Image (tube, coloured by chain):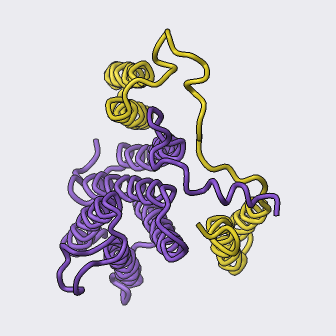
């Protein structure tokens, strides 16, 4: 993971350099703030990848002599199908509509968001799926 | 019943991805959190832009209760510590406490999560309490700071309000996590979820420290 870490650390250094140059050339607080937070963005990911890379060691994709079969195995849990994201998205849309048109709609939508998010998160923790 | 097979594989996933691979959930959370940083970057940019074009900063009528907000800031920072204590307990598979409630060093993940939730709720409650005070400040004279009373009021409520929304989202995440802990045994997914929720909580905490420093502690006048 060293390569990915270096890529993001390089971005952080680049943004930091441009930020300083930008400030001295323009004295514009808006862009300077955005660039400063972009440094944080790249640094956060670079830092995470470095630390995780040190902990997990070399992955097959880090070694030139790795075999394809070494990358086999569990990648995580993926839901085969679910209706909940559709309803969650519709509820979030309702909240956005509520912010534009009427606050009562936003509050109603917020209730839908919590209900559908509950279905989304807990779908594989009930009935036959209970681990 | 097509998904029974996935149900049986649920327990096999290692907590942090397979042996030599980080968990997809953790990496995704970090990428999302860094994009969240850019969301707050927009708010900070608004703040500094308005500040740079204002003649006096903050406006004279502004009365921020730095003492009270400092107090709830300390509570939020400490809640990050209790959240991390919960993660350490989860990594040792201590989910429920193994002693009486007063012996906090025997607490499991659930007790730490509940304490973190309470501290986060105190923070959000304190913010709402302060908002009502700011709106009602100089109520008799018709003053008070609202989101539409001044540019300063707009960005103050936008920045702190969006942060408070993030804290509230974290509280909901804690409730969902606690609900999942109640169901079945402690699978590696639950450990991953615990860890990424703690990432989010630390993120929200750090963002608040920056907002607090910028808005409350260094409000020198702009140019």
At which x and y percent is residue A64? Answer: 49, 9
Marker count (numbered)? 0
Residue pictured at 37% horizontal, 24% vertical: A9
Position of B205 compared to B32: left or right? Answer: left
Position of A36 compared to B173: left or right? Answer: left
At which x and y percent is residue A18? Answer: 38, 20
Establish if A107 lies above or below A42.
below
Position of B174 compared to B209: left or right? Answer: right
Front-most of residues B174 and A60? A60
Position of B9 compared to B99: left or right? Answer: right
Q: Quadrant of the N terminus of chain A?
A: top left
Q: Is residue A29 visible?
A: no
Establish if B164 lies above or below A52.
below
Q: Quadrant of the C terminus of chain A?
A: bottom right
Residue pictured at 37% horizontal, 28% vertical: A57
In the rendering, what colour is chain B?
purple
At which x and y percent is residue B195? Answer: 41, 55
* Chain seen in yellow: A
Residue pictured at 30% horizontal, 64% vertical: B89
């Amino acid at each position: 993971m060293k390569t990915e870490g270096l890529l993001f650390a390089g971005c952080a250094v680049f943004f930091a350099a441009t930020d300083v140059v930008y400030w001295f050339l323009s004295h514009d607080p808006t862009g300077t703030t955005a660039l400063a937070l972009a440094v944080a963005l790249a640094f956060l990911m670079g830092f995470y990848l470095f630390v995780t890379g040190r902990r997990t060691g070399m992955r097959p994709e880090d070694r030139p002599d790795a075999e394809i079969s070494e990358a086999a195995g569990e990648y995580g849990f993926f839901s085969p199908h679910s209706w909940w994201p559709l309803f969650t998205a519709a509820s979030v849309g309702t909240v956005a509509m509520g912010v534009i048109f009427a606050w009562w709609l936003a509050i109603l939508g917020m209730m839908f968001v919590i209900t559908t998010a509950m279905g989304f998160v807990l779908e594989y923790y009930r009935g036959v799926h209970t681990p | 019943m097509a998904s029974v097979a996935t149900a049986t594989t649920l327990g096999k996933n290692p907590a942090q991805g397979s042996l030599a691979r980080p968990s997809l959930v953790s990496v995704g959370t970090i990428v999302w959190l860094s994009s969240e940083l850019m969301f707050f970057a927009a708010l900070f940019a608004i703040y500094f832009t308005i500040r740079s074009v204002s003649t006096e900063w903050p406006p004279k009528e502004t009365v921020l209760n730095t003492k009270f907000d400092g107090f709830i800031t300390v509570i939020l920072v400490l809640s990050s510590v209790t959240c991390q204590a919960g993660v350490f307990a989860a990594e040792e598979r201590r989910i429920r406490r193994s002693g009486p409630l007063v012996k906090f060093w025997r607490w499991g993940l659930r007790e730490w999560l509940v304490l973190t939730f309470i501290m986060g709720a105190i923070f959000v409650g304190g913010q709402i309490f302060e908002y009502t005070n700011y709106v009602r400040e100089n109520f008799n004279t018709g003053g008070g700071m609202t989101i539409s009373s001044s540019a300063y009021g707009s960005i103050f409520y936008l920045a702190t309000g969006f942060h408070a929304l993030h804290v509230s989202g974290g509280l909901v995440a804690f409730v969902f996590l606690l609900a999942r802990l109640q169901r079945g045994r402690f699978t590696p997914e639950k450990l991953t979820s615990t860890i990424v929720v703690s990432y989010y909580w630390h993120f929200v905490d750090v963002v608040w420290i920056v907002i607090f420093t910028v808005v409350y502690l260094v409000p020198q006048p702009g140019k």
